[in-house]
Image (cartoon, grey):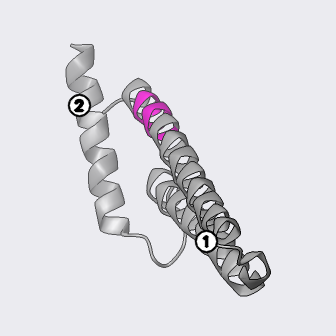
Amino acid sequence: MNGQNDLAMRKSLKKWALVFVAIQLLACDVGMGLYMMQMVSNGLVASISDGVLIAWMSSSLVEVIGILWVIARNLFPFRDNQRDKVAEKEFNRMTKLIEAVNKH
């Protein structure tokens, strides 16, 4: 893959990741709204637990951060001890080979 293909793939993945995160947040907000409306319609306004609200919103935040972290980690690998140096060298070698073939 050349640089343009990588850039196009990253843009596409960024777009879909943002769409997925937006849908996830919307679903969380709709679910919380339905929960609160159910409690209000049953006359249980005082029983809407702060703990439930905090847990619901916290789990949504952690889920979104986790999704974005995985995407960022795969698109832009960190230069640390966790990386696969052999695979990186092979990928770079193959990329150069493909670019050389495409030039001719």
Residue ID for mark 2? 98
Residue 3 spot, x, y in % from top left: 43, 30
User: Tag 1, which secondary structure?
Assistant: helix
- Disc 1 marks which residue? 62
- Between 32 and 70, which is closer to the camera in this rendering? 32
Question: Magenta-highlighted stretch: main secondary structure?
Answer: helix
Magenta-drawn segment: 7-14
Q: Position of residue 65 (x, y in %)?
A: 61, 64
The reply to whether the magenta stretch includes residue 12 is yes
Looking at the rendered structure, the secondary structure element under dot 2 is helix
Looking at the picture, how far across and down is residue 6, in whole percent? 41, 34
Residue lying at 49% horizontally and 59% vertically, measured from the top left: 77
Tell me the amino acid under the disc marked 2.
Ile
Q: Is 18 covered by the magenta stretch? A: no
Q: Earlier in the sequence, mark 1 or mark 2?
A: 1
Q: Residue at x 50, y 61 (%)?
A: 67
Q: Quadrant of residue 94?
A: top left
Along the horizontal axis of the image, is 56 left or right of 15?
A: right
**Which amino acid type is marked by label 1?**
Val
- Residue depicted at 30% across the width and 33% down the height: 1
Q: Mark 1, residues whose alpha carbon is within 10 Å: few (<14), some, or many (≥20)? A: few
In three-dimensional space, the C-alpha distance between marks 1 and 2, rounded to whole angstroms, equals 39 Å
Whether 42 is drawn above or below 29: the answer is below
Would residue 35 be found to the left or right of residue 16 on screen?
right
Which residue is at the front of the view, 60 or 51?
A: 51
90 lies above or below 70 = above
**Is 24 in front, or is 32?**
32
Judge from the rendering whether residue 48 lies leftward or rightward of residue 6; answer left or right.
Answer: right
